[in-house]
Image: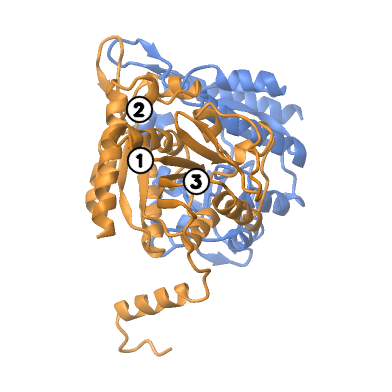
Amino acid sequence: LAATVGILDIDLCGPSIPRMLSVGRPDVHQCDLGWVPVYTDAEKSLALMSIGFLLDDPDDAVVWRGPKKTALIGQFVSDVAWGELDVLLVDTPPGTSDEHLAVLENLKKHKVDGAILVTTPQAVSTGDVRREITFCKKTGLRILGIVENMSGFACPHCSECTNIFSKGGGEDLAKLTGSVFLGSVPLDPLLSASIEEGKDFIQSFPHSPTFSAITSISHTLLNSLQAA
Amino acid sequence: IPLMGVTHKALQERQRQQMARGLPKQKPITGVKQVIVVASGKGGVGKSTTAVNLALGLTAVNPSKSVGVLDADVHGPSIPKLMNLKGNPELTDNNLMIPLTNYGIPCMSMGFLVDDAAPIVWRGLMVMSAIEKLLRQVNWGSLDYLVVDMPPGTGDVQLSISQNIPVAGAVIVSTPQDIALLDARRGAEMFKKVNVPVLGLVQNMSVFQCPNCHHQTHIFGSDGARRLAETLGVHFLGDIPLHLNIREMSDRGQPVVVSSPDSPEAEAYKKVAAAVVRRLEEVST
């Protein structure tokens, strides 16, 4: 799928996107239209913006109260020269606070197609995500679907599957709240390792069950977006 | 301010003094001897599970000590589920909320005050006000330790708590993954900025042993937290393995330290509790 995608990382206290896509410590430049996003490759197929790029040391702690966070998020939405994008993905921190309110308020003038909610199967996670679902319904944000992450672990040695974080919790939550269930992604040490090393998992392990799971979720999501 | 001839250290000291000026005075919570915060930086690393089992571990290691748990994660309160507690707290004659108790541990959480499915869509200012109530308007009685389950991040809640009450120490929980460690490092840095002693790092989800063939897999990487502790000059409090039992018991609201007290998982938590007690003595002298 040759789509141009942007990722906006609004987890200001814990920006993980720059590290996961191993873009190093690039400077962010200004152009006439605003901040130029950081691209992961020469083809400019993936554009990123994160507070990690704006700090002197990307590993510095960002100890900010709400109003400061709200102001920066406003700038991230309005003052980044994204160019032509097919999809803009916004990575949010846990919870339902300043960051979430700020991004929704600032995106109001643009079209927000919806939210994807990620949960792990166990009760403490689904309990939190249940609140997120109510938040989306109350703010009129369409729920594109729920993803159940870290769903089951297959031992690489004997293939026995252990449901370390339980299984089915995300699917049950989708049923309970009348939301679309996009699919489950298993616990995969190859995926964690790829992210640690900044490798492209999709390119490195195209035959893994995790890859099939992610591909299936992407297809369901894109169909749902096109149908709307 | 002329920058020429001023050392980096002098600038840092000046910044520290400026930050300390005009802040609310720290006032201890009546009846609570020592406050231990359990934080992480990153979400989903097991703070709440660790906080609960740490609290129970503290009583297991020294049964004469009284321990309470405060759930400061206003947006995603997990303590009610983990401690199998439900219901609205009653009030004393002077309008203090009475904590709900299970396994001998009095607890207070936003989860007791709102509906299960209700989102708490509050900006920083309202969150601060709620935290103030959870700190000051609870009838804790006399506690040796109050374990505070912090929310993820390094924002309003962390600042409010460290500015309002004296905190004896912070336990930082991380998984071995780099991205969790980066956030743990930010968490440790934040505590240094607000003068809260870092008791140490706990490496959660350290390793998984297949129940069938006993093969060990480091699902989230290996030993990263231990190495980070060395790099930061922070103590390493212990490893907690990934074990099906921990999550199964958590889902049932029966923390593993009480439901399977002789298991290796429970032992791991008790070891961390013992290390926390030792570190508290070290930092208070």
Which chain hosts label 1?
A: B
Q: In the rendered view of the protein, which quadrant contains the N terminus of chain B?
A: bottom left
C-alpha gap between disc 2 and disc 1:
44 Å
Drawn side of residue B161 relative to residue B14, left or right: right
Which residue does the numbered mark 2 point to in the structure image?
A190
Which residue does the numbered mark 1 point to in the structure image?
B65
Residue B237, percent from left and from top? 26, 42
Which residue does the numbered mark 3 point to in the structure image?
B141
Residue A181, percent from left and from top? 63, 21
Decide if residue A199 is in sight here: no
Which chain hosts label 3?
A: B
Image colour assigned to chain A? blue
On the same chain, marks 3 and 2? The answer is: no
The amino acid pointed to by label 3 is Gly
Query: Mark 2 against mark 1, which lies toward the viewer?
Result: 1
Drawn side of residue B48 relative to residue B243, left or right: right
Pointer 2 and pointer 1: residues touching (CB < 8 Å)? no
The amino acid pointed to by label 1 is Lys
User: Relative to B175, does residue B233 appear above or below in the rendering?
Assistant: below
